Amino acid sequence: MIFSRKTPPQPTPYGIAQLKEIPLGGVKQWVLIRGENVRKPVLLILHGGPGMSLISISSAFFRQLEKDFVVVNWDQRGSGLSYDPDLDEKTMNIRQFVSDICELSEYLRRRFHKEKIFLLGHSWGSLIGTLAVKQAPELFYAYVGAGQVVDMARNEEIAYQELLDFAQKENRPGLLSKLEEMGPPPYQKPVDTMILRFGLTMTHRDAWNGDVSMRKKIFRAAFASKEYRAADLARYLKATSFSMKNLWWQAVEVDLKREAPDLSIPCIYILGRNDQIVLPQLSVEYYDLLRAPYKKLIWFEGCGHSMMYEQPEKFQQVVAEELMPFVPKLPKPKG
């Protein structure tokens, strides 16, 4: 991490490497645009959280995708570089985030002269990404949902019961006392959800080991980032807290089985077999009932919730291979 914001240049003649602010929904927000060839299709990545922005670590985990796409990482409203302590909290709502996605997608489509773009959402990003696809399918060739959120209210109910059963079976009085003190969800305080997530992950050794390894990779990537200044780390932490406070309770109210039972574009879902943050059985339920012109489910064995950090090379390869069939063929030159 350094003291001025920049992104390394591309070594190719048609490459692009830009870190810039653009207005979305009346608020300046930061995007990182990188690709080895501006003629390639555009891939917009929606980070999770809410508030866990990706610009600071994109070079470590998405560089391979830059060979096949113009990759756009966006620090969403109130997140990362886009955090502003004076931001009107009334604008921190799911409807506005979906509107921001559509506006940004339109901007990218026009700027790079594309009929449509590709969309990839992880965790929270998969929730708002799905709603954007439902609202404006004409903007997107295809959608990838990684760690796909479906119904966080039910997710938390199942997680609480699993952890309660574990505490009783394994005779963990401290954990049992804390769970009884918290009571079953829904929770008004994000910290209670974090306690639930941490406790459930700790009961699954495979998921926990992956989580520890993943966190080390992320911290190393963030501190090596050229896109974030040293002071931006504190900004990131404030932004994450701000975003969780304003958006978590809204995310819990969404059920995609009710709000998006059908999508009119191809949909690919990538799930970690050991995910204890977004329980994969709920993602599979949604996948089974989803009506779409094309859908595919891909499992990452040995991974938890963040397969793009745990197995980044494989993740990028899978995304590129799965999306390439939906890239429109360019007309052959005449003569």
Image (cartoon, rainbow, N blue to C red):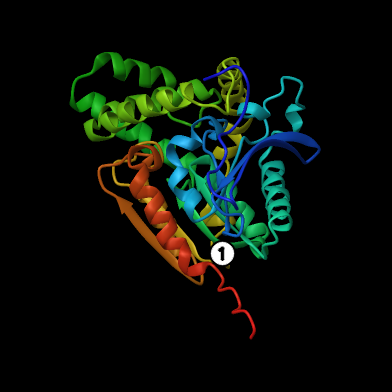
Label 1 sits on a secondary structure element that is loop
In the image: residue 258, left or right of residue 104: left
In the image: residue 294, left or right of residue 77: left
Looking at the image, is 274 positioned above or below residue 178? below
Q: Position of residue 316 (x, y in %)?
A: 41, 49
Residue at the (45%, 59%) spot, across then down: 268
- The extreme left residue here reads 170
Q: How many labels does the image show?
A: 1
Q: How crowded is mark 1: few (under 14 residues within 10 Å), some or many (20 or more)?
A: many
Question: Callout 1, which amino acid?
Answer: Leu
Q: Where is residue 45 in the image (x, y as percent from the top left)?
A: 55, 46
Residue at the (73%, 27%) spot, across then down: 89
Q: Which of the two residues, 123 or 59, is positioned nearer the viewer here?
A: 59
The residue identified by callout 1 is: 263
Residue at the (61%, 27%) spot, across then down: 80
Q: Where is residue 26 in the image (x, y as percent from the top left)?
A: 81, 38
Q: In which quarter of the image is residue 125?
A: top right
- The extreme right residue here reads 26
Q: Is residue 183 visible?
A: no
Residue at the (33%, 25%) spot, across then down: 199
Q: Which of the two residues, 162 or 132, is positioned nearer the viewer here?
A: 132
Looking at the image, is 335 positioned above or below residue 197? below
* Quadrant of the image containing the C terminus: bottom right
Q: Can residue 98 be seen in this view?
A: yes
Q: Position of residue 115 (x, y in %)?
A: 67, 65
In the image: residue 271, left or right of residue 58: left
Q: In which quarter of the image is residue 277?
A: top left
